[in-house]
Structures are given as structure tokens and as C-alpha cells.
Image: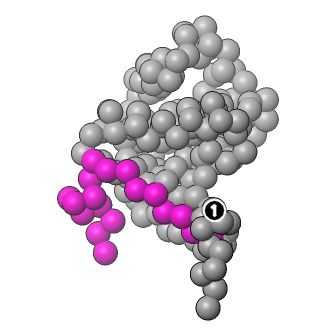
Amino acid sequence: SDVCSSDLRGRTYRLAVPDAGRRQAIVNQLDASGIAALVPAAGRLIANLKVWENIVLPLAYHGGTSMPELESRATALFGELGYSPGQVRDLALQHPDRLGALERRLVAFVRAMLAEPEVLVLDSVADGLSRSEAARALALGTAYLRRFPFRTVGHVEPEPADSAEGMEA
């Protein structure tokens, strides 16, 4: 089926899946679709590369965008997320293992945004975060739709335990 039919565009959807294995299979299928970019809870960053390399190298390898243009666009996106140029510079030189959970997700988000996907998949982006961090992570979908208003955001997350009670047959 067409994951990106016109009636889905410009909207945000939440998919709550109780089984972790099934949820991962759904996320993997969306990620492999070619139209979606994934922002996973762990960030999916390569440990021995600096943040900046994690952002621009995959895009430079797969696309026709120049490094200076990617760097400029990434810096602007981090600015929209509240980072000053100095903070972006400091963050860019870090290795992923030195980042907090929210920062890893923000880096993955910037990388996804630079790919300009038709569908942005936010996989359990609020898991393990404080309330204020979770609010920032969940707002990434809004930031995506501000830039790409006719595209789609999908939140894939575990189903809350209390909603599954009494549903066993």
C-alpha cells in the first residue's frame, strides 16, 4: 500500500504497539521504505565518528549535496532547536557516547531533516527522558511539519501497560 497517500500528508499519527519485537519490525519496515527517515530513541549514531560526521557523511555519500551546504543547513536546524553557534560547534566535535539521550535524538533528528523525507518516524523518542526533555523530543514532529507542512510524522511507541489491561481473550 502507498504509505504516503495524499490523505495522510500534513498530519501526525501515533502507533502504539505492545510487543517490542513487532514494534521494531514495523520501524525497520518504515526505515527501509525509502520515503521515511527514522529518529530512534538511541539515536543510531556511529560511536567512533564525531557528531558532525554522523550528520553529514551519510548524506554526502547518498546525495548530491555539498558538504558546505549540509553544514550550513545543519547549523540552521540546530539554531531552530535553540542551539547557539558556539553550542553547535561544541556539539559537533563530541562523540555520541558523550551525549545525553535527548542530544542523541536531536542529532538524529537534524540528520533526518537534512534528508528531507516524505515521512518522519519518531521511534519511542520520549522514552527514558525527563518531562521537559520528553516535551522537547515530542516537539520534533511539530518542527518537521513547520518545515514540511504537507508531509507526515509517525510516532511509534510502546503501548502503555494500563491500556492493554482487560484486552486478553
Q: Which residues are magenta?
A: 1-18
Q: Is residue 129 visible?
A: yes
Q: Is residue 150 above or below residue 154?
A: above
Residue 32 placement (x, y as % from top left): 48, 63
Residue 4 higher or lower than 79, as above or below: below
Q: Position of residue 100 (x, y in %)?
A: 74, 32
Give the secondary structure at mark 1. loop
- Residue 38: x and y in percent read 51, 51
Classify residue 25 by image quadrant.
bottom right
Residue that badge 1 annotates: 160
Residue farthest along the left direction in this orientation:
6
Q: How many marks?
A: 1
- Looking at the image, the residue that sits furthest to the front is 166
Residue beneath the point at 66% across and 21% down: 91
Which residue is at 72% across, 24% downward?
A: 94
Left or right: residue 3 compared with residue 6? right
Q: Quadrant of residue 72?
A: top left
- The residue lying furthest to the right in this view is 98
Image quarter hosting the N terminus: bottom left
Q: Residue at x 44, y 54 (%)?
A: 154
In reply to whether residue 95 is colored magenta, the answer given is no
- Identified at 46% across, 57% down, the residue is 14
Q: Amino acid at mark 1?
A: Pro
Residue 59 appears in the rendering: no
